[in-house]
Image (cartoon, helix red, strand yellow):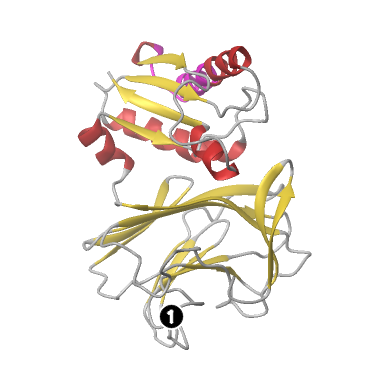
Amino acid sequence: MVSGTIENANFDGENVIYFRETGNFANGIVPLLKNPSADYLPEAFTVEFDAYFKKGKYSNYYVFFYDAKNKSQKRIKDGFISLYVNSAKYAYTGTEKRLENTKFANKNMESSCWRHIAISFNQRAMKVYLDDTRLLNIPNITDNLTGITLSVNHANQDNSQFIKNIRIAKGAVPLYDKVLTDGKFVTTGIKFDVNKATLKPESMGTINYVVKMMQDNPDWRFSVEGHTDSDGNDATNQTLSEKRTEAVCAELVKLGIAADRLTAKGWGESKPMTANDTPEGKAQNRRVEFIKM
């Protein structure tokens, strides 16, 4: 943590990071690393997390591309991303350069919601996704992106600003390219109610992305395969994973994808991506894979 009051908390039955007070939008949290003073962002990387937006409250989240705690910069030198419930913006402090996209400006905010954020960077471009819909495609970024700081806009207890499922990974490959290169893509962006096969509203970004991809490639067929963490017993998790993938396939069919282009399969907890000994590990293991057939 850089400054302010930011803590681990439990919200709606899930582990979250709670921004109680920041005071300054450049304050926030940074990764805990063995050598934080080094430039730890590779030439290509992806940052993902889920952000909570409370009904009737103005909230926005920031991703700065330097480490505010361990670097020597006194102010933000490099470009940063501002994220809102309906839009994303790339900007520089103290300059006029600004790129904005308000594609979701008409999003219904009658209820609070989670949005899935993904930022993909390589030497050619930075791409920003909101619920797996690309909002920004920024070419030819020449800034020295050295680290990560996550923050919010003057947090207070009434705003209820939470993030969860944070992931920073080497590589910046869009889902479409993953299908072409790996024959599949893996997502944790499809969410379900706890111990149920009921899709959460924030899942629709990923599902709509799959629909668009399959509409653009009418010869593609997918095996939709679900995985759980290790909570609960084996038999229950096996059944749960099967019902969840069936629910995903049913939603895709409802949105116009032919049923014969999809098969559903559940693996329960039998194929973890990582250990189930941390909340972050369990979140990674609760995933849906789309394997091209």
Tell me if residue 167 can be seen. yes
Which residue is located at x 49 percent, y 63 percent?
31
Q: Position of residue 93 (x, y in %)?
A: 44, 83
Q: Name the residue under label 1.
A: 71
Asked if residue 193 lies in the magenta stretch, the reply is no
Segment colored magenta: 245-259
In the displayed image of the protein, which residue is found farthest to the front? 34
Quadrant where the N terminus lies?
bottom right
**Quadrant housing residue 45:** bottom left
Q: Position of residue 141 (x, y in %)?
A: 27, 70
Asked whether the viewer can see residue 118, the reply is: no
Relative side of 226 to 179, left or right: right
Residue at horizontal 66%, vertical 22%? 232
Name the quarter where the C terminus is drawn. top left
Dot 1: element: loop
Residue 237 appears at what percent x and percent y? 59, 19
User: Looking at the rendering, which quadrant does residue 5 occupy?
Assistant: bottom right
Query: Within 10 Å of the Cα at label 1, are there few (<14), some (14-19), or many (20+) other Cα atoms?
Result: some
The percent position of residue 173, horizontal first and vertical second, equals: 28, 47
Q: Nearer the viewer, residue 61 or 151?
A: 151
Indicate the amino acid at tag 1: Lys
Q: Which of 178 and 229 is in front in this view?
A: 229
